[in-house]
Image (cartoon, rainbow, N blue to C red):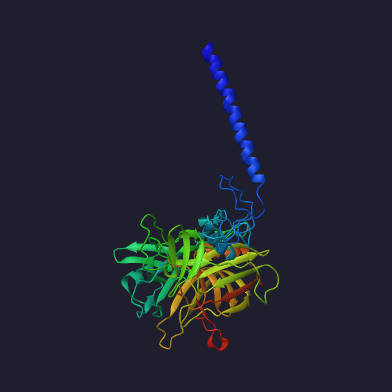
Amino acid sequence: MKNFKIFFVSIILSGYILMTTSQSTFSQENSQPANSEPSKSVQFTPSITVTPPPSDEPKSTPNNNNDAICFPDVYPTDPEICNPLGPSEYLTDLAKKGLHYPPLPFISGKVDENLSVVPYQYAKLNVENSEVIPLYATFEDAEAGTNPIEYLSGGTIRYVSFTNRIDSGSGHFVQSKKGVWLRASPAAVSSTTLGRTFKTTPAQYFGWVFEGLNPYMKPDFNSGVNTTVYYNREDVLPILDIVEGKDTTWYQVGENQWLDRIHFRAALFNTTPPVGIPGGRWIEVDLFQQVVMVYEDYSLVYAAMIASGMKPFYTQPGIFQIYEKKNTEDMTGSFEADKSDYYYLEDVPFTMYFDQARAFHGAYWRAWYGFEQSHGCINMSIGDAHWLFDWAEVGDYTYIHDPSGVTPTDPSYYGQGGA
C-alpha cells in the first residue's frame, strides 16, 4: 500500500512539471520581439498547402502537371492536373489516328464458302504457251489426234468449261460447252473466300497477311522477329498502329508484332464518300493495298483482297458506274503485238462491267490474291465475287485509286482493258 502511494504521488508530480514546462515554452514563443531570431526549439512540419519560400524548383500543387503522370488513358486535351506522358501519350497518339490499344473486339463475318459453288466444271490446257490446241468433233478423233475441225490459239492462260469428261490411257479428254473435244486437265476450283462482312463499321483498320511469317519485334527489318507468334497467309488481323518507315509501311498487329507492307494488305476504309459520288453507297478499290471495300448507308459492309491490272495493263483509276451484270461471260483477248499474252476463259462467273471491258469477276484460275495479275479487271475469288454481285446494282458507283501514285491517271494511257 505504501509503495502504491509513492507511485501515485510520482505520477502527479511528473504531470505538474511537464505542464509547467509547456506553458513556459509557449510564453517565450509568443513574447519574442518582432525582429528577434526565431526560436531554436523543434517546430511542427508545415502542410504542403503552405506556400514554400521562392525557389527555382517547380511547384507541386493539384493544378500543376509538371510532376504528376496521368493514369493511362486517352487525353485529347491537356488535363492540367497531370502530365499525359508515357502510356497516355502512346494511347493518345493512337486515338488521333483512329486506332485503339488494346484493340477493340474485331467483329466480322466471313463470306460463306457455299457462294463459291457454281454449276460449271473447268479444265486447263496444260501445254506450252505457244502451242496451238486442236479441237475435235468426237472423243475418238481427239484420242487418236486425227481430223481436227478447228484450233485454239496459243496463249498464257487457257481454260474451257466442260460438260463431259473421259479419262483414257492417253490422258484426260473433255467436251467443252461448245461441243468440241480436246485434251485438257480438269481443274480443282478453290472454295476459299477472303471477304469479310460487317454489320457496323469496325472500330479500327484491319488487313490480311499476304505471306506467312513471324512478325517483327519493331517497325524495323533489323529488330529481329517474334518467334512466339506465327501468322498464316490470309489471316485477318486488326491494326493497332501504322508507321511510315524509310522503305516500307509498318503495321502493328499486336504487342511486339509488326508486319511490313510486303507481307500485309490493309483495309484503310473511309466512310466519307469521295468527291463525285452522291449518297452513301459505293465500291472502293485501293490499288496499292489490293483491297476492295463496299459501303452502304455510309458504313463499311464488306471488304476483300483482289488482284488488279498488272503493269502495263493497269486498272484505270477514276470514278465509274457499273453498267452491266452477267452471271457468266466468256473472255478472250491479247494486248501484246505478238499475241503472247493471249488468254481464253470460258464461263467467267459473276461479271460486272464498270469501265469498258474492265469488270469485277470471279477468277477460278487464280490461287493467290493481293497483288497485280490481270489485264485490267478486278479479279476476286468466286465466293467473294458472288457476294459483291448479289449486293451490287447497275448504276452503283466505283471509286478506284492508287495512294502510291504509281498507277497512271491520264485517261489517254488506257485502252479497253481485259480479264
* Coordinates of residue 314 in the picture (x, y in percent): 50, 80
Q: Position of residue 147 (x, y in %)?
A: 36, 77
Dividing the picture into quadrants, the one containing residue 125 is bottom left
Find residue 95 and report its image quarter: bottom right
Quarter holding the N terminus is: top right
Image-based side of 27 in relation to 407, left or right: right
Identity of the residue drawn at 53% across and 64% down: 304
Vertical arrangement, residue 167 with respect to residue 44, above or below: below
**How far from the left and from the top, in percent, is residue 331?**
50, 75
Residue occupying the far left of the picture: 169
The residue closer to the viewer here, 25 or 322, is 25
Could you tell me if residue 241 is visible in this image?
A: yes
Furthest-top residue in this view = 1
Residue 370 appears in the figure: no
The spot of residue 392 in percent (x, y) is: 63, 66
Report whether 276 appears left or right of 414: right
- Above or below 28: residue 245: below
Residue at the (46%, 84%) spot, across then down? 335
Q: Is residue 114 above or below residue 210?
A: above
Out of 415 and 221, give the one closest to the viewer: 221
Label tally: 0
Front residue of this view, candidates 299 and 261: 261
92 vs 159, left or right, is right
Most distant residue in the right direction: 279
